[in-house]
Amino acid sequence: MVTAAAAITMGLAAPSSAAPVEKAAVEPTAVQALPPGFRSVGYMPSWSGNVNTIQYRKLTHINYAFALPNANGTLQAIPDPNKLRSLVTQGHNNGVKVSLAIGGWNNGNDSAFEALARSAGTRTAFVNAVVNVINQYNLDGVDIDWEYPDPGASGNNFTALMQQLSGALKPKGKLLTAAVVSGGSTANGVQPAVFGVVDFLNIMAYDGGSPHANYQWSIDSLNGWKARGLPASKAVLGVPFYSRPNYLTYAQIVAMNAANAQKDCIQASGAQQCYNGIPTIKRKTQWAKTNAGGIMNWELSQDTTGATSLVSAIFDAAGS
């Protein structure tokens, strides 16, 4: 005699009293939920934040910051490699592409980039180091954050470096992006020849304007890049998750008073602190939907969760 349980195990008919099993609804990834081609990019620093609290399904790309280059083209050790491994695993499980950001402000010291980009030999060493680290950590690409190649010889070397990186990464299906200055004469260090070899540029439209990173100044920054020939689809508008002048994080500002999420300036730490609250973030995102290739934030550990989250504000405004 076959019992009902055995019948089910053997693939026979289930008891007539059994209820049909419903599959749990799967939340769409950001790539599925956002407009085609729209990017929501977040930087995750090695020194701050917990990768387990990231709202992965509201992001399309995450850049792990920062690896540092050496003058001979090699890379310094990856900071907190286990954090990077966890970020890659969780990112990929949620449809997010994870890249390694190389460089950063580094207290204004870009001497290693200047040196390695100067000769074909050290450029090749750097490209090989990038390919190796991408393979080692199962990364989706690299974000070059040279702050900043100067117009002239430095800009020529940056172009040569980016072209060589593109030649190595594109056949492997890997991303090549870069973080670039908001504007001004320094922007000319990133030559139009670079525009064709990158997937997109993360325009750091913050640390400028009065008040800090205000709507019009930020839009003007991105439009300045478009006027130089950068396609709108490759222009990603950067927004700050912190204030100037005292660099209070958005999370700290909201912790003072939840109503601060709806403002752009408050009085704190003995000065007027200006940042981007939810209305301005949404307004910038809505503009970017039509006029740019997405929104980038610096940086994820400075955000809140729940109703005041700026990552959520970007996701909601882009998807609405």
Image (spheres, helix red, strand yellow):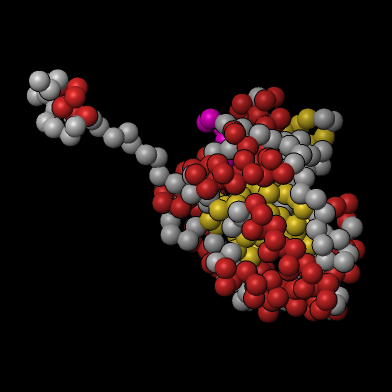
Q: Taken as a whole, is the magenta stretch helix, strand or loop?
A: helix
Residue 117 picture quarter: bottom right
| Residue placed most toward the observer, 138 or 60 | 138
* Magenta region includes residue 96: no
- Asked if residue 304 lies left or right of residue 162, the reply is left
Q: Where is residue 255 in the image (x, y as percent from the top left)?
A: 67, 25
- Asked if residue 184 lies left or right of residue 112, the reply is left
Up-down relation of residue 166 to residue 144 (above or below): below
| Residue placed most toward the observer, 25 or 250 | 25
Q: Which residue lies furthest to the front in this view?
A: 1
Q: Where is residue 91 in the image (x, y as percent from the top left)?
A: 55, 45
The residue lying at 54 percent from left, 62 percent from top is 293
The residue lying at 12 percent from left, 22 percent from top is 2
Q: Give the range drawn in magenta.
A: 306-311
Residue 229 picture quarter: bottom right
Up-down relation of residue 16 to residue 186 (above or below): above
| Residue placed most toward the observer, 80 or 289 | 80
